[in-house]
């Protein structure tokens, strides 16, 4: 199942190997252009589809269906793109049978699904268009991964025993501080029902390695537990103190309320810039330190005082600003690339939906 990614069968190095008779091998051997369909999985994942185009000897698992396209009538790439469309996948869910933790789409119901088939040459042209969109998405994805790796390397080199950041730190005086000497945990207790706050941010609303808070709940739209009484304001840093290996650090751009298990943090900006602190808290060294001082096994957590022995060296404020600007600039480009991918995906889905009508 994990070998079907974005409509294509891939070898991620985790495929199982087996010994077969020559007869069985001929029966189950995959050929270029075969379409693999996941007929049994969770309700969310059942129906995942991908085209096989790997070189070498491969077979398919029993929970997959292999579909062979009549090359005189249809193009396998065109059919695969249609089957991976949101509209077709939604249509498949209506014929899936549910069991405990699983769903199944049997071959009979799959064969009943209707797809439009324009002339073969037109199918190939459409498939080529979709492939060009996929290629563009892959290129954007590669750029995004490269920039994220660069950002991570830069921040890890800065938050190290021997800090460096290109040439910016050469000849600069660095001062060593303990974490709690240059930050403070804010505990503004409020009654969220009467204070006038609209947004509630829970732990699940904080994404790993993403400073932006993209989802939230609203006051009055569900149960609000007693732990949700901590006010945060735009500009504050939110840090998930549970399971810190998840690297949940967010830079709020609105006011809201969170639980007391989410730390609201502010840098003492006469010593450390808030814009740099958020990057420091996503460094590998800080993350490993927080994991090391965590308590508990099922749901490990940290106490604020546990962070005090984390030490780091920082330059003057002007240099900090230069470093923060570089790091923020990289992430701004990453965000633009994400939006490009989303736009390309939306374009493809719109075209597919028009074809499926």
Image (cartoon, rainbow, N blue to C red):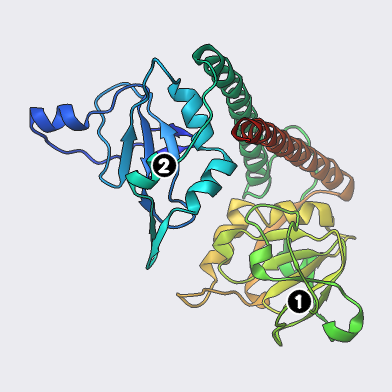
Element on which disc 1 rests: loop
Q: Position of residue 247 (x, y in %)?
A: 61, 58
Tag shown at residue 112: 2
Q: CA distance from mark 1 to mark 2?
A: 41 Å
From this view, report whether residue 213 is shown above or below residue 324.
Answer: below
Left or right placement of residue 299 versus residue 231 in this view: left
Q: Quadrant of the N terminus?
A: top left
From this view, report whether residue 77 is shown above or below residue 88.
Answer: above
Q: Which residue is mark 1?
A: 221
Tag shown at residue 354: none
The crowding category of the residue bearing disc 2, from other C-alpha atoms within 10 Å (few below 14, some 14 to 19, many at least 20), is few
Please count the marks in the image.
2
**Residue 146 found in image quarter:** top right
The extreme top residue here reads 121
For marks 1 and 2, give the one nearer the viewer: 2
Q: Position of residue 176 (x, y in %)?
A: 73, 58
For marks 1 and 2 on the same chain, the one whose residue lies earlier in the sequence: 2
- Depth order, front residue of 236/324: 236
From this view, report whether residue 329 is shown above or below residue 106.
Answer: above
Left or right placement of residue 92 versus residue 246 in this view: left
From this view, report whether residue 173 is shown above or below residue 291.
Answer: above
- Depth order, front residue of 127/299: 127
């Amino acid at each position: 199942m994990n070998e079907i990614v974005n409509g294509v069968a891939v070898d991620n190095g985790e495929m199982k190997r087996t010994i077969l008779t020559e007869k069985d091998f001929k029966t189950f051997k995959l050929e270029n252009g075969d379409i693999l369909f996941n007929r049994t999985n969770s309700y969310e994942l059942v129906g995942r589809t991908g085209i096989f185009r790997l070189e070498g000897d491969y077979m398919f698992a029993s929970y997959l269906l292999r579909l062979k396209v009549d090359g005189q009538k249809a193009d396998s790439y065109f059919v695969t793109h249609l089957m991976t469309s949101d509209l077709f996948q939604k249509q498949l869910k209506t014929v899936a049978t549910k069991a405990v933790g699983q769903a199944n789409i049997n071959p009979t119901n799959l064969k009943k699904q209707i797809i439009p088939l324009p002339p073969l040459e037109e199918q190939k042209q459409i498939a080529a268009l979709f492939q060009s969109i996929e290629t563009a998405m892959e290129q954007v994805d590669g750029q995004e991964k490269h920039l994220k790796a660069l950002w991570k390397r830069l921040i890890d080199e800065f938050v190290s025993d021997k800090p460096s950041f290109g040439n910016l730190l050469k000849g600069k005086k660095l001062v060593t501080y303990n974490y709690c000497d240059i930050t403070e945990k804010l505990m503004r207790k409020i009654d969220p029902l009467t204070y006038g706050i609209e947004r509630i941010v829970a732990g699940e609303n904080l994404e790993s390695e993403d400073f932006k808070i993209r989802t939230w709940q609203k006051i009055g739209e569900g149960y609000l537990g007693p732990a949700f009484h901590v006010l945060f304001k735009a500009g504050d840093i939110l840090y998930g103190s549970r399971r810190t290996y998840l690297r949940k650090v967010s830079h709020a751009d609105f006011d809201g309320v969170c639980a007391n298990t989410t730390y609201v943090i502010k840098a003492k900006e006469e010593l450390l810039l808030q814009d740099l602190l958020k990057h420091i808290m996503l460094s590998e060294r800080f993350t490993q330190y927080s994991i090391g001082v965590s308590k508990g096994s099922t749901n490990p957590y940290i106490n604020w005082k546990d962070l005090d022995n984390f030490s780091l060296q920082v330059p003057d404020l002007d240099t900090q600003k230069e470093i923060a600007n570089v790091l923020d600039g990289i992430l701004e480009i990453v965000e633009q690339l994400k939006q490009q991918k989303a736009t390309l995906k939306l374009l493809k889905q719109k075209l597919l939906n028009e074809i499926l009508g």
